[in-house]
Image (cartoon, helix red, strand yellow):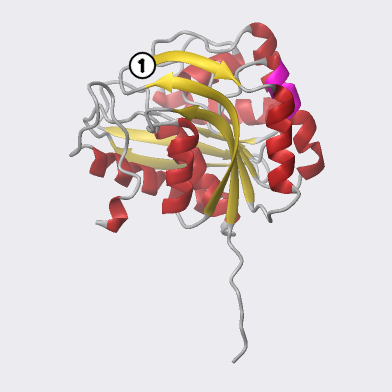
Amino acid sequence: MKNTKTIYKTVLTIAGSDSGGCAGIQADIKSISANGAFATTAITAITSQNTVGVNSIYPIPSSEIKNQIVAVLSDINIGAIKIGMLQSAEIIEAVLETLEAYKDLPIVLDPVMVASSGHNLLDNSALEALKLLLPMATLITPNLPEAQVLLNIDVISPENMPEIAEEIGKTYKTSVLLKGGHIENSKTLVDVLYNYQTNTLHNFSKTQVNTKNTHGTGCTLSSAIATHLALGNKLKDAVQKGITYTHQAIVAGKRKELGKGNGPVDHFYKLY
């Protein structure tokens, strides 16, 4: 009998570690695994955090971040890359330099720039460096505050989200999933995909879920999309599957509790 082996479909996530397990690398690994791929990692920072907040951040030296990326990509057949928060211009430039040789891989970049409190997480030098990285991505997944920073505008409404998504895409030469989760007082939320390659717009609607357990939602979504790209899906289908998975994980997580603050989504709701 012939011995045939199945090769893993694999995703590399480049992001920070969350000691509370709700977001960052930990959420990425869970999301990638739950959506059917094998997760590999390059850790950019170690954070001391829980469901209440972040206590401290210890950045990994940029040389060691590069070493992690090269170690994975030189050995393992990676199907897609997910990039999360990159804390400094030095780290962003290191990631950009290292990935230059892997431009053909699908890259989903979650441009984490604005905290839920509204404070900017990147200084000007880091923001300018990030803008140079965006065109390398297959897809970026900004929320509304991040979109405001990328275009230096003050207000985004549900009505002009398609226009904003297209403007970001054409400005940074990449496809854009503009997430509508920050729209207030709406029973229905809409995410808008602008496909830069086909110059088309697509809307994805979902019901607003009344829950505080949304810590790590952006990490979960971007990792799920990267996974479905690694599995061979076209961009629109990968986005649809990622949104559906994340929404269902939020619904399932609503019924659970972890810690005293904002808990996670239920990444493995399909198992029980």
Looking at the image, which residue is at 74% across and 26% down? 63
- Say which quadrant the C terminus sits in: bottom left
Picture quadrant of residue 218: top left
Mark 1 neighbour density, 10 Å: few (under 14) some (14–19) many (20 or more)? few
Give left or right: position of 169 versus 239.
right
Q: Nearer the viewer, residue 266 or 173?
A: 266
- Whether 49 is among the magenta residues is no
- Say which quadrant the N terminus sits in: bottom right
Residue furthest to the bottom: 1
Span shown in magenta: 90-95
Looking at the image, which residue is at 41% across and 52% down? 34
Q: Nearer the viewer, residue 173 or 11?
A: 11
Asked which secondary structure carries label 1, the reply is loop
Q: Is residue 83 visible?
A: no
To which residue does mark 1 refer?
53
Q: Is residue 159 visible?
A: yes
Looking at the image, which residue is at 58% across and 59% down? 9
Residue furthest to the left: 255
Q: Is residue 164 above or below residue 251?
A: above
Q: Position of residue 242 (x, y in %)?
A: 45, 47
Q: Is residue 50 above or below residue 155?
A: below
Q: Position of residue 33 (x, y in %)?
A: 46, 52
